[in-house]
């Protein structure tokens, strides 16, 4: 018997209705995440990532379609589905009256970890140590900085040792050092067999961590593939330079311009030469030229700008 997908989205749609206005946040989203995957869900602001996670978490009802966690329908079999999930929400929510440790004990209690609230303390201590919160265990939640509160949210999601971990922008506002510690810890849990679903706007994190990636745009899946395949499918060389001059029209059409900085992608060395020749012919003075490999950000922008056809290949992971 084939193993059950960790998460299965089937034709999921979500329409928000308010005073004469309708927002179609999700439009027929279908894909499976297999057990043990480290899966990335990317998309610009408003693409529908949090909406999809809210439906998965049972926090909001889909307008159509079905979502299952390890075979449990998130509506019909809510308790079992929810218990399989550890969710780090995008919004900071916390009870200001409890300490960090109390918050984690209470959260464990919701999922029936143990009747004795202290029985889970060894795991709570391990979570606190791994998230750099050991010295804050007895601090009150309102005494924590924003980044520390976010770390507590991560600990809260993991306190009942869920097989499926869902992180909705867990590193927003988190410092560089903790980001690294957090990823080491999540990667370790993934190696131990936990499935991870991650949304992030830090595309270099997604590139480094995720085996497969789905990209959402206006509520639809516009790309889904192994990270390596997404990267291989793009123009593979990136050219970056500074200039004060006006780019030739043919070059300008495909350039990403930020202030004085111009970024271009090229398929190979010959195309790099062609681009530079066009610049010379157009009298453009090129400063601080860098040539490097195209990254996930280039792929993302190419797909979001509709510069390449959607690659939707919800195949099983390698
Ligand atoms: N509770 C709500 N009521 C009405 N519209 C909503 C609600 N929540 C989200 N939306 C709308 O649904 C769309 C998708 O929002 P969603 O929060 O899912 O995006 P996102 O991909 O998570 O974006 P971000 O990267 O900014 O977190 C947006 O147009 C948003 O305005
Ligand atoms: Mg969101």
Image (cartoon, rainbow, N blue to C red):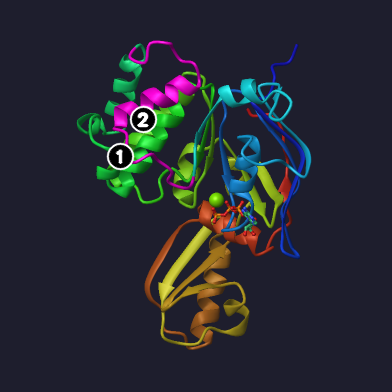
Residue at point 42%, 46% (across, down) = 92
Q: In this view, does 95 lie to the left or right of 315?
A: left
In reply to whether residue 193 is colored magenta, the answer given is no
Residue at point 49%, 83% (across, down) = 280
* Quarter where residue 252 is shown: bottom right
State which image quarter holds ligand 1.
bottom right
Q: Which residue lies furthest to the left in this view?
A: 135
Q: Foreground: 298 or 88?
A: 88
Q: Mark 2 points at which residue?
A: 103
Q: In this view, does 279 lie above or below 210?
A: below
Tell me where residue 288 appears, x and y as whole percent: 35, 72
**Does residue 276 appear anywhere in the picture?**
yes
- Dot 1: what SS? helix
- Dot 2: what SS? helix
Q: Foreground: 211 or 38?
A: 38
What is the magenta segment's predominant secondary structure? Answer: loop
Location of the C terminus by quadrant is top right
* Quarter where residue 68 is shown: top right
Residue at point 64%, 51% (across, down) = 48
Q: Residue furthest front?
A: 97
Tell me where residue 156 appears, x and y as whole percent: 41, 30
How far is the residue under mark 1 from the one under mark 2?
A: 8 Å
Location of the N terminus by quadrant is top right
Magenta residue span = 90-118
**Does residue 232 appear anywhere in the picture?**
no
**Mark closest to the chain's N terminus, 1 or 2:** 2
Q: Is residue 71 left or right of residue 231?
A: right
Q: Which mark is residue 141?
A: 1
Residue at point 33%, 14% (across, down) = 118
Tell me where residue 286 appears, x and y as whole percent: 41, 79
Q: Foreground: 214 or 279?
A: 214
Residues under numbered marks 1 and 2 in contact, where contact means CB atoms less than 8 Å apart:
yes
């Amino acid at each position: 018997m084939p193993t059950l997908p960790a998460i299965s989205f089937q034709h999921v749609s979500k329409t928000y209705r308010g005073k004469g206005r309708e927002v179609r946040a999700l439009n027929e989203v279908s894909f499976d995440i297999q057990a043990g995957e480290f899966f990335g869900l990317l998309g610009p602001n408003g693409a529908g990532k949090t909406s999809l996670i809210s439906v998965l978490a049972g926090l909001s009802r889909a307008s159509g379609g079905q979502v299952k966690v390890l075979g449990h329908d998130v509506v019909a079999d809510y308790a079992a589905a929810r218990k399989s999930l550890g969710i780090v929400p995008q919004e900071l929510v916390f009870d200001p009256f409890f300490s960090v440790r109390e918050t984690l004990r209470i959260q464990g209690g919701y999922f029936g970890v143990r009747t004795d609230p202290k029985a889970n303390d060894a795991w709570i201590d391990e979570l606190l140590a791994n998230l750099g919160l050991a010295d804050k265990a007895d601090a009150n939640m309102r005494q924590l900085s924003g980044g520390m509160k976010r770390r507590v949210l991560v600990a809260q999601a993991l306190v009942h040792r869920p097989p499926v971990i869902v992180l909705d922008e867990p590193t927003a506002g988190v410092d560089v050092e903790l980001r690294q510690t957090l990823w080491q810890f999540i990667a370790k849990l993934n190696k131990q067999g936990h499935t991870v679903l991650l949304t992030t706007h830090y595309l270099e994190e997604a590139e480094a961590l995720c085996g497969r990636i789905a990209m959402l745009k206006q509520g639809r899946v516009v790309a889904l593939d192994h990270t390596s395949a997404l990267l291989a499918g793009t123009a593979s060389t990136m050219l970056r330079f500074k200039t004060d001059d006006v780019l030739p029209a043919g070059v300008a059409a495909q350039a990403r311009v930020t202030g004085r900085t111009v970024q271009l992608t090229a398929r190979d060395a010959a195309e790099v030469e062609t681009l530079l020749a066009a610049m010379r012919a157009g009298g453009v003075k090129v400063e601080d030229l860098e040539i490097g490999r195209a990254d996930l950000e280039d792929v993302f922008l190419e797909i979001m700008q509709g510069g390449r056809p959607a690659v939707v290949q919800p195949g099983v992971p390698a």
